[in-house]
Image: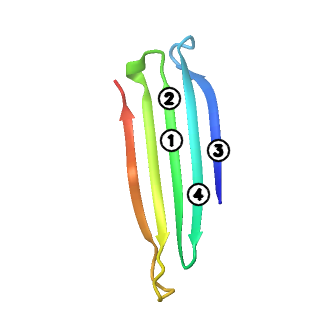
Amino acid sequence: RSWRFVSKGTGFNVTNPFVLYRIDEQTSEMQNEDYPQSTYTHEEQLLVQAPKSEDNFIYHLIVKVVFSASSDPGDPPTVMFDRSYANCVG
């Protein structure tokens, strides 16, 4: 199972309303169930495009949760943070 949300829009600089920013946000989640083990993946990506490319901002996060196939149902899941970063280009 999986689902995905995509949001796009524009915003402006409060001190100068003629300076516009473009916003692109994507969120997705995926479940992979291979009995007796399953994996849940959550991914977020945010891109803010400024008038000057050196002012762009990128945020990306991927989290994986693995429910192991161990014989003990009380074992906690394993959580991994993959490729997580925030980057201001300028």
Read off the residue under disc 4: 30
Disc on the earlier residue, 4 or 1: 4
Q: From the image, state whether disc 3 or disc 4 is nearer to you.
A: 4
Closest to the observer, 67 or 45: 67
> In x, y percent, where is residue 58?
44, 34
The disc labelled 2 sits on which kind of residue? Val
Read off the residue under disc 2: 48
Q: From the image, state whether disc 4 or disc 1 is nearer to you.
A: 4
Q: Residues within 10 Å of mark 3 (few under 14, many from 20)?
A: few
How far is disc 3 from disc 4 in space, using C-alphas? Answer: 12 Å
Residue 22, relative to residue 65: is it above or below? above
Quarter where residue 85 is shown = top left
The quarter of the picture where the N terminus appears is bottom right
Quarter where residue 30 is shown = bottom right
The disc labelled 4 sits on which kind of residue? Met
Label 1 with label 3: CB-CB less than 8 Å:
no
How far is disc 4 from disc 2 in space, using C-alphas? Answer: 25 Å
Q: Residues within 10 Å of mark 2 (few under 14, many from 20)?
A: many
Read off the residue under disc 1: 45
The disc labelled 1 sits on which kind of residue? Gln
Q: Residues within 10 Å of mark 4 (few under 14, many from 20)?
A: some
Q: From the image, state whether disc 4 or disc 2 is nearer to you.
A: 4
> In x, y percent, where is residue 57?
43, 30
The quarter of the picture where the C terminus appears is top left
Closest to the observer, 26 or 19: 26
Disc on the earlier residue, 4 or 2: 4
Q: Residue at x 43, y 66 (%)?
A: 79
